[in-house]
Image (cartoon, rainbow, N blue to C red):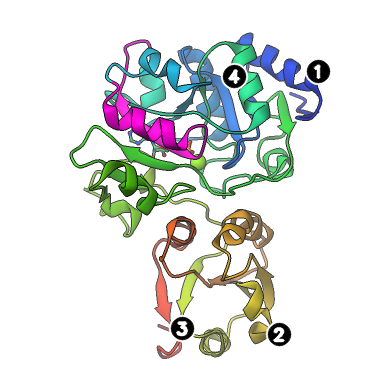
């Protein structure tokens, strides 16, 4: 299959993608979070094609995208006041809510769960396609399962060329990490995945909000995470990733002490100099979590090369929303391996 690269700024290209989706096809589209691989959420065969193109395990459910909160009752059989309040404050935007599903949502979308994850995306082209397609769109990140989420059309082409008919190029994504996911079927509501809307912002609207253990730690094999996808290895380049805490100088000494052939360092812009001599990719400013979120997945992809033996990553402290999201994605890429730079070599 040939994969057409289309332009999100051209109305005829947006219309062409909407036509593909209306006709039961799938296509990659920009959102404000990451690129999504979209298809009609109400058609189980289309949903199966999304899973197949990504190589995604069938027990990892998809997020359903709708044009407006008014469409929520079509998707969710209960719309609690908490959902309405979050929708008013954060939609369109990078927030997904988990609610009891309507029977019209196929099992394949929800991986058999009785709940469905829904959001209203903010990207103009995605919204135009939603309106023109006239159906809710299931859209997981448009990457091969396991690799970092795509934040440019080129990332999508790298992963899915030949496997999908079209990619709508809207340039780099604004947020750069996937949406915040909050489960509104539990009491109190529970954060399942940190993202562009912070825990603090959720608490302003909802009061008490719990945090799923999978956000901060690796799940044991017999544990069931609130968000099923959380158990999979994610965002991971070929080389193992290790998060290195401590000062930049300590981290540089630690990397040197490992004595590895071709180690690489993923660090903040400000500290790139401290890692001179190693292959370094800086992914944003430590003082600007938005820049870190925007740069993270592109940086992980840049280091996804066979000669790189290990990736030593510098990770922001978990102080506010986007830092928490960046830390969560990096910890997942690292399979929660974190070392302190002053620890002896080889640990
Ligand atoms: P992705 O679309 O690749 O960003 O992944 C969507 C993620 O949303 C999944 O991996 C789950 O963690 C979460 N999710 C989707 N549907 C549900 C649901 N019904 N209940 C809990 N989490 C969900
Ligand atoms: Mg994904």
> How many angstroms separate mark 3 from mark 2 (CA)?
19 Å
Camera-side residue of 317 and 311 = 317
Residue segment shown in magenta? 79-104
Question: Which-is-in-front pick, marks 4 and 2?
Answer: 4
Residue at the disc numbered 3: 246
Q: Which residue sits at x=46%, y=48%?
A: 195
**Which residue corresponds to mark 4?**
130
Return the mark for residue 257. Answer: none
Q: Is residue 145 left or right of residue 263?
A: left
The disc, 1 or 2, on the residue closer to the chain's N-terminal end is: 1
Q: Earlier in the sequence, mark 4 or mark 2?
A: 4
Mark 3: few, some, or many residues within 10 Å (few <14, many ≥20)?
Answer: some
Measure how far apart labels 1 and 4 are at the Cα level. 15 Å
Is residue 315 visible in the rendered image? The answer is yes
Q: Earlier in the sequence, mark 1 or mark 4?
A: 1
Q: Quadrant of the N terminus?
A: top right
Ligand 1: does it lie within 8 Å of the C-beta at label 4?
Answer: no
Q: Position of residue 194 (x, y in %)?
A: 41, 50
Reading the chain from its start, which is encountered first: label 3 or label 4?
4
The Cα–Cα distance between marks 1 and 2, rounded to whole angstroms, is 49 Å
Residue at left offset 33%, top offset 19%: 76
Q: Residue at x 65, y 60 (%)?
A: 299
């Amino acid at each position: 299959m040939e994969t057409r690269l289309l332009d999100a700024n051209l109305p005829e290209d947006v219309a062409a993608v909407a036509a593909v989706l209306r006709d039961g096809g799938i296509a990659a589209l920009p959102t404000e979070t990451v690129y999504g691989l979209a298809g009609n959420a109400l058609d189980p065969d289309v949903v199966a094609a999304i899973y197949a193109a990504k190589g995604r395990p069938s027990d990892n459910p998809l997020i359903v995208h709708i044009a407006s909160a008014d469409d929520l009752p079509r998707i969710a059989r209960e719309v609690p006041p908490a959902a309405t309040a979050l929708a008013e404050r954060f939609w369109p935007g990078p927030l997904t809510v988990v609610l009891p599903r309507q029977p019209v949502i196929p099992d394949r979308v929800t991986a058999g769960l009785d709940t469905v994850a829904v959001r209203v995306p903010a990207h103009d082209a995605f919204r135009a396609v939603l309106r023109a397609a006239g159906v809710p769109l299931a859209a997981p990140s448009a990457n091969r399962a396991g690799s970092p989420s795509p934040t440019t059309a080129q990332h999508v082409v790298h992963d899915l060329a030949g496997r999908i008919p079209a990619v709508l190029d809207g340039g780099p994504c604004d947020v750069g990490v996937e949406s915040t996911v909050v489960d509104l079927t539990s009491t109190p509501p529970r954060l399942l995945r940190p993202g562009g809307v912070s825990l603090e912002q959720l608490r302003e609207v909802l009061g008490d909000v719990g945090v799923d253990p999978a956000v901060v730690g690796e799940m044991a094999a017999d544990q069931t995470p609130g968000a099923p996808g959380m158990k999979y290895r994610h965002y991971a380049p070929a080389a193992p990733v290790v998060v290195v805490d401590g000062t930049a100088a300590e981290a540089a000494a630690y990397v040197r002490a490992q004595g590895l052939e071709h180690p690489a360092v993923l660090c903040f812009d400000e500290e790139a100099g401290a890692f001179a001599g190693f292959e370094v990719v800086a992914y944003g400013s430590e003082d600007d979590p938005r820049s870190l979120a925007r740069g993270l997945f592109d940086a992980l992809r840049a280091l996804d090369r066979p000669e790189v033996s290990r990736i030593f990553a510098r990770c922001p402290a978990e102080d506010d929303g986007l830092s928490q999201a960046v830390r969560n994605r990096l910890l997942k890429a690292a399979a929660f391996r974190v070392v302190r730079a002053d620890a002896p070599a080889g640990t």
